[in-house]
């Protein structure tokens, strides 16, 4: 009943209560000298619609038990309201607008990209110093796995993962190795509001392995039939004022919650596997979503409905169990925070900050986000937010907010908004999204106006806050750079040095140093080199990460193979056998 009452009062009261429960004491790393395992459980397209975050529409017992032994971070924000730019920041610790990964998306859509005048797919070639976070962990002794989504805005080099794919799992690590494992739960994705394909992790046909014994986890869902929503038809669901108040919309919202229910079962499956393996007490667990909710005026936008996500972090020793921490946390903080938690000094190229561990720094004052091309439509918006106020800068005020995206219009709740728009029956809150123009600047009080419907930018009593956030945004853009100011076609030409083809990474070359050790080099600055020694590495999925001179037994018939790739470039050809 308490959560029902809190929800009826709105997010503002919940945030106020959250702020009251904050502690200044932030967790340190586990026992010095011991490398903890790190498990990331990542769902998609989900705002904080969980009982642990104040929404008791449904119960999510597995996430609630994780929250009971962990710390909740309700002020966690993506750097974009859509997945690929968000995952770019997670993977690299660099803002998408800085590294060229800000347009949605740069890969998996040759026809659409060519229709925009682009040469086809491209990767974002980050600065030559940048590495994927998973590679940094590999270089420091970790076995890293990703199951299975990538979507980084570039092709991951072979140095990124020991295992990548639908069977990747910590269970495949060598004895004694700590692991960093990611599992991406796609059931809460926008497409699953209308799609019939509703897998588990997503388990696919023929997926059963010793790692994922299906007798331990069944959904009972057919891939060919759309399953009925397993929530009561009369279950009251919260309806934001910007959505149409119709039965079709409420069905979409019920589907969102039902997908969360399924996702919670998947979380429980992974937590149970960790417990079965005796690893709970040696593993740091993160749970979060890749950006905000899947419904209209949520995903892709820079309102809190598109940026704000639930995050739970559970430490092996259950420190601060059950607490709520209101620290502002940005997706660019993941890489430095995790590296700091396991004792790795964050590199200078990282644009986020360490919020945990040995190298943690004081809490940030603001989070920042950006929106650029979404599918085939260009716009450019930047956001800055403190604990209460959100500032938006619209670079194309002559363009409306609503973008007619074919993908999104498959959703019944979107169709309902368009129907009522055409009939002239939208409420003021619903019609706000369909304005033909937008102001150059917007300012919202997210505590008193959680849906960000009332622009305060022109009110004199908020002039100081507007000036503060405007200056914070300017300082951020000066610090990280903003490639959104450059037309995408020109940007890609710059990436490719004026060519119409993606650059090819230079093939690795082999030489020996004065001690007789082997050195691998590529002429391409920023190239990451992976190698294998055969037959020793035969049957191993991942490649070794080259970190410096090494030896191998040339007299025993071993063969060395190597490949190089700079992020954003094509992979080199395979080296000749040495």
Image (cartoon, rainbow, N blue to C red):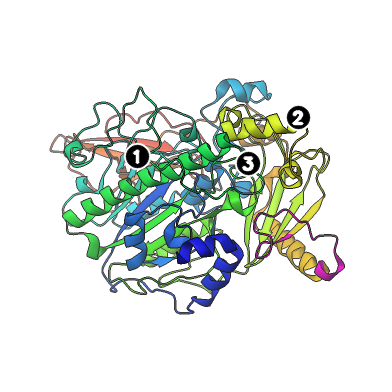
| Magenta-drawn segment | 444-462
- Is disc 1 in contact with disc 2, using a CB cutoff of under 8 Å? no
- Image x and y of residue 5, in percent: 52, 64
Say which label, 1 or 2, has the lower sequence index.
2
Q: Residue at x 32, y 37 (%)?
A: 200
Q: Residue furthest front?
A: 234
- Image x and y of residue 411, in percent: 56, 31
The C terminus sits in image quarter: top left
Nearer the observer, 329 or 570: 329
Determine crowd level at label 1: few under 14, some 14-19, many 20+ residues with C-alpha closer than 10 A. Answer: some
Say which label, 3 or 2, has the lower sequence index.
3
- Is disc 1 in contact with disc 3, using a CB cutoff of under 8 Å? no
Front tag of 1 and 2 = 2
Q: Is residue 156 left or right of residue 102?
A: left
- Image x and y of residue 536, in percent: 17, 39
Determine crowd level at label 3: few under 14, some 14-19, many 20+ residues with C-alpha closer than 10 A. Answer: some
Q: Residue furthest bottom?
A: 24
The chief SS type of the magenta part is loop
Nearer the observer, 489 or 194: 194
Q: Is residue 265 left or right of residue 255?
A: left
Q: Residue at x 64, y 55 (%)?
A: 480
Point out which mark residue 245 bears: 3
451 falls in the magenta region:
yes
Residue marked by disc 1: 510
Res 457 visible: yes
Determine crowd level at label 2: few under 14, some 14-19, many 20+ residues with C-alpha closer than 10 A. Answer: few
Point out which mark residue 28 bears: none
Front tag of 1 and 3 = 3
Q: Is residue 242 left or right of residue 20?
A: right
Point out which mark residue 423 bears: 2
């Amino acid at each position: 009943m308490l959560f029902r009452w809190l929800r009826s009062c709105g997010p503002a009261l919940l945030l106020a209560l959250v702020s009251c429960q904050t502690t200044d004491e932030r967790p340190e790393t586990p026992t010095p000298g011991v490398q903890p395992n790190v498990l990331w459980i990542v769902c998609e397209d989900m705002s904080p619609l969980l009982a642990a975050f104040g929404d008791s529409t449904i119960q999510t017992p597995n996430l609630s038990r994780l929250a009971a032994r962990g710390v909740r971070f309700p002020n966690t924000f993506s750097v974009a309201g859509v997945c690929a730019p968000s995952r770019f920041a997670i993977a690299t610790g660099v803002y998408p607008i800085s590294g060229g990964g800000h347009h949605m998306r740069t890969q998996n859509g040759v026809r659409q990209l060519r229709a925009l005048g682009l040469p086809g797919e491209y990767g974002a070639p980050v600065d030559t110093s940048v590495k994927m976070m998973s590679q940094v962990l590999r270089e420091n002794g970790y076995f890293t796995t990703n199951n299975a989504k990538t979507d980084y805005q570039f092709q991951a080099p072979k140095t990124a993962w020991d295992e990548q794919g639908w069977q990747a799992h910590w269970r495949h690590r060598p004895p004694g190795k700590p692991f960093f494992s990611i599992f991406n739960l796609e059931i809460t994705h926008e497409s699953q509001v209308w799609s019939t394909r509703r897998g588990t992790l997503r388990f696919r046909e023929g997926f059963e392995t010793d790692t994922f014994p299906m007798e331990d986890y069944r959904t009972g869902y057919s891939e060919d039939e759309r399953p009925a929503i397993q929530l009561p038809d009369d279950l009251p669901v919260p309806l934001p004022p910007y959505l149409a108040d119709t039965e079709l919309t409420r069905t979409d919202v019920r589907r969102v919650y039902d997908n969360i229910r399924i996702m919670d079962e998947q979380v429980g499956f992974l937590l149970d596997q960790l417990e079965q393996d005796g690893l709970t007490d040696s593993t740091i667990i993160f749970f979060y979503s890749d950006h905000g909710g899947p419904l209209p005026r949520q995903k892709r936008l820079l309102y809190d409905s598109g940026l704000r996500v639930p995050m739970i972090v559970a430490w092996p020793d259950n420190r601060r169990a059950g607490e709520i921490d209101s620290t502002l946390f940005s997706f660019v903080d993941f890489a430095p925070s995790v590296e700091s938690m396991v004792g790795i000094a964050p590199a200078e190229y990282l644009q986020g900050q360490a919020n945990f561990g040995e190298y943690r720094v004081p809490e940030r004052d603001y989070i920042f986000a950006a929106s650029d091309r979404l599918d085939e439509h260009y716009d450019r918006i930047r956001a800055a937010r403190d604990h209460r106020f959100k500032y938006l800068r619209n670079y194309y005020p002559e363009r409306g907010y609503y973008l007619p995206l074919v993908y999104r219009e498959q959703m019944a709740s979107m169709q309902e908004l368009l129907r009522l728009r055409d009939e002239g029956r939208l409420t003021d809150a619903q019609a706000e999204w369909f304005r033909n123009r937008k102001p150059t600047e917007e300012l919202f009080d997210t505590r008193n106006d959680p849906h960000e419907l009332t622009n305060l930018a022109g009110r004199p009593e908020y002039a100081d806050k507007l000036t503060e956030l405007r200056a914070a945004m300017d300082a951020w853009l000066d610090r990280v750079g903003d490639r959104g100011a450059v037309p995408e076609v020109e940007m890609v030409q710059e990436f490719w040095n004026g060519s119409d083809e993606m650059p090819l990474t230079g093939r690795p070359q082999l030489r020996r140093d004065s001690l007789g050790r082997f050195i691998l080099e590529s002429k391409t600055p920023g190239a990451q080199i992976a190698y294998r020694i055969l037959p020793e590495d035969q049957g191993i999925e991942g490649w070794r990460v080259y970190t410096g001179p090494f030896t191998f037994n040339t007299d025993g018939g071993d063969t060395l193979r190597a490949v190089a790739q700079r992020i954003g470039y094509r992979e080199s050809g395979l080296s000749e056998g040495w």
